[in-house]
Image: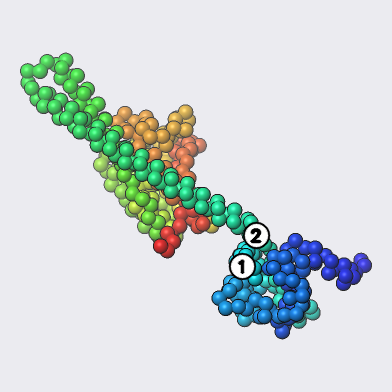
């Protein structure tokens, strides 16, 4: 293969869409290209007549940009890509992506190479998108707070008449002279008043969930506490629950109170729908690079496939005495953790509840400094 002439190599480098800068051991500029000159607002003559320090070392200016070069010299930190601001001589600030490496030949270092990409426009769009998302989040938060206050107000206004209806009906039932037909009708009124009161309580619970307070949580302790509460609840119902937990302890970011509440609702759902006095539940925790997965499975009757799409809808229930707010509460908690929750029937019978909580930049994370 024929070798390219130095002139052709220079032309290729000069036409590259990214800035190229090669700095020699003494800080002199060995090579620059047109894109670099346009990006940094410096002429080729300036690059050729001055060294790195003369061009870039200014008091309290472009500190992050200069630090890249210093890190290469002092700590040999190469092949790193960083996003830094750069203020040009005309006062315009650009956002740069800088990648550093060594220029080596036959094992000897001949200089430092910086590849510089101008991403100012893209960075501005990203920042604008963040601002819009933050504004939208604030609007949604305010809207949610308004709906919460409305729900609590309505619940309060309904609860008082319901309690009066139930109370007076119970007093009337104590009348020994009351006819049997009237007793039956009063019993129906009391039963429905009790049901309405449970619905109001469910609305209040849903609307009164506290704000998310993420912190570092040990997964094992959280799962053990939820399983212990399930065992206690099963005894109250006269059932025996056999729990198999497969939890490798790990530290996660979550609100321990709210996440346990979501777990309680899922586990209690498995208990309530069991048509046997003996309930088998398996709780699994798996940590992944992008989050953690909690899987709760049982060997109960499962759920009618026609009902699955509505399982997380408020007030949807197939239980004779149920209100239908447990699973919606669990879903709301998981979603506020920036997670997902799904239900599916298991082959051979039973139900599987899958909760995935994202972690990191796009997931549940610790609050930043005020």
Residue placed under numbered mark 1 in the picture: 91
Q: Is residue 28 left or right of residue 89?
A: right
Residue drawn at 40 percent across, 56 percent down: 214
- Residue 202 lies, with reference to residue 135, above or below; the image says above
Task: Kindly identify the residue that appears in the image at 37 percent across and 29 percent down.
Answer: 318
- Which element type, helix, strand or loop, lies under badge 1? loop
Looking at the image, is mark 1 or mark 2 nearer the viewer?
1
Looking at the image, is 366 positioned above or below residue 275?
A: below
Q: Where is residue 281 in the image (x, y as percent from the top left)?
A: 40, 44
Give whichever of 339, 235 is nearer the camera: 339
The quadrant of the rendering that contains the N terminus is bottom right
Residue at 11% in and 23% down: 172
Q: Which residue lies furthest to the front in this view?
A: 90
Q: What percent of the width, then of the height, locates residue 309?
A: 47, 33
Q: Residue furthest right?
A: 2
Q: Distance between the residues labelled 1 and 2?
A: 17 Å
Specify the quadrant of the image occupied by residue 213.
bottom left
Q: In this view, does 172 lie above or below 154?
A: above
State how the image is colored.
Answer: rainbow
- Decide if residue 272 is on the left or right side of residue 73: left
Frontmost residue, 206 versus 228: 206
């Amino acid at each position: 293969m024929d070798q390219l002439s130095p002139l052709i190599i220079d032309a290729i480098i000069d036409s590259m869409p990214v800035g190229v800068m090669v700095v020699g051991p003494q800080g002199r500029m060995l090579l620059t290209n047109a894109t670099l000159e346009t990006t940094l607002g410096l002429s080729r003559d300036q690059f050729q007549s001055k060294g790195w320090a003369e061009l870039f070392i200014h008091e309290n200016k472009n500190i992050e940009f200069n630090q890249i070069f210093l890190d290469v010299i002092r700590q040999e930190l190469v092949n790193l890509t960083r996003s830094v601001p750069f203020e040009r001589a005309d006062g315009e600030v650009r956002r740069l992506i800088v990648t550093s490496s060594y220029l080596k030949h036959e094992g000897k270092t001949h200089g430092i190479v910086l590849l510089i990409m101008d991403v100012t426009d893209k960075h501005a769009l990203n920042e604008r998108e963040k601002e819009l998302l933050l504004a939208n989040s604030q609007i949604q938060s305010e809207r949610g707070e308004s709906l919460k206050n409305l729900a609590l107000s309505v619940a309060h206004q309904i609860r008082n008449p319901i309690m009066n209806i139930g109370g007076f009906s119970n007093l009337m039932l104590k009348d020994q002279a009351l006819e049997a037909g009237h007793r039956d009708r009063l019993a129906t009124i009391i039963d429905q008043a009790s049901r309405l009161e449970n619905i109001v309580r469910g609305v209040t619970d849903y609307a009164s969930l506290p704000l998310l307070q993420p912190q570092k949580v040990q997964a094992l302790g959280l799962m053990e506490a939820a399983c212990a509460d399930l065992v206690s609840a099963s005894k109250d119902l006269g059932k025996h629950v056999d729990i198999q937990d497969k939890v490798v302890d790990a530290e996660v970011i979550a609100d321990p109170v709210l996440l346990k509440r979501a777990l309680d609702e899922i586990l209690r759902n498995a208990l309530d729908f069991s048509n046997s006095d003996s309930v088998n539940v398996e709780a699994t925790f798996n940590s992944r690079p992008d989050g953690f997965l909690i899987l709760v499975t049982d060997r109960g009757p499962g759920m009618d496939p026609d009902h699955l799409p509505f399982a997380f809808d408020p007030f949807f229930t197939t239980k004779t005495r149920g209100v239908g707010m447990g699973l919606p509460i669990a879903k709301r908690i998981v979603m506020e953790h920036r997670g997902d929750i799904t239900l599916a029937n298991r082959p051979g019978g039973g139900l599987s509840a899958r909760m995935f909580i994202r972690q990191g930049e796009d997931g549940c994370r610790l609050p930043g400094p005020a």
